[in-house]
Amino acid sequence: MKKVKTLILIIVILFIAIQFVPVKRDNPPVVADMPDTEPVKAILQQSCYDCHSNATTWPWYSYIAPVSWLVSFDVHHGREYLNFSEWGSLNAKQIQYYKQNIWYEIDKNNMPLKPYLWLHPEARLTPAAKDTVKSWAIAADSSGVVQP
Ligand code: HEC
């Protein structure tokens, strides 16, 4: 019994201690956001912007370690791959590359990431939303721009 109490005490102390590890929860300035005229913008805002833009909504659990470490990792990792807050500074070739990549990840149900969908069911793309993304991405294919 004493051992169990000691173990619980250690776990509680560890849990409190890890709360003091600094976690990066930044939202850098948005310089070149995807234009509102893009037909897919609202869909991407709803399903992707939390990890792929500088306009992340940091949820309450992003303040509690160790979950906060995972959230921070996903956001910073996600922004490295694709950041809609920098869309306006991409050239035509990059835009075509990203459009294809975006549709590929959505079509394969790789994105949004599964754990994110459990916590954000509203981010799941409806079949209609997927169609909208698909025609937007495929229009890019026929634009004749070569792939990087
Ligand atoms: C919970 C965070 C999160 C959400 C939400 C999210 N992504 Fe990602 N995304 C990531 C991370 C992390 C990576 C980089 C590592 C990887 O591929 O898993 C990534 C990578 C990508 C890549 C690059 C893949 C590659 O390998 O080159 C694309 C494209 C992408 N995401 C598109 C999307 C789209 C489109 C949405 C919305 C429908 C979305 N993501 C939603 C976290 C997220």
Image (tube, rainbow, N blue to C red):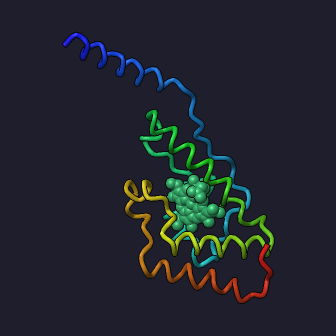
Percent coordinates x, y for residue 144 in the rendering: 78, 87
Residue 94 in the image: x percent, y percent? Answer: 76, 70
Does residue 49 appear anywhere in the picture?
no
Quadrant for the N terminus, please. top left
Picture quarter with the C terminus: bottom right
Farthest residue, direction left: 1
Q: Is residue 74 left or right of residue 1?
A: right
What residue is drawn where x is 57% and y is 44%? 73
Position of 91 with respect to 12 (left or right) is: right
Locate residue 146: give its quadrant.
bottom right
**Is residue 3 among the parts visible in the rendering?**
yes
Q: Residue at x 58, y 85 (%)?
A: 135
In the displayed structure, would residue 16 be above or below residue 26? above
Most extreme residue toward the top is 2
View quadrant of ligand 1: bottom right
Tell me the residue at 64%/54% (across/down): 79
Query: In the shown orientation, is residue 104 left or right of residue 92?
Result: left
Residue nearer the viewer, 62 or 31: 62
Which percent across, then down, holds residue 138? 63, 85
Residue 33: percent from left, percent from top: 68, 63
- Horizontal arrangement in the rendering, residue 89 relative to residue 135 (left or right): right
Quarter of the image where one finds residue 125? bottom left
Number of marks in the image? 0
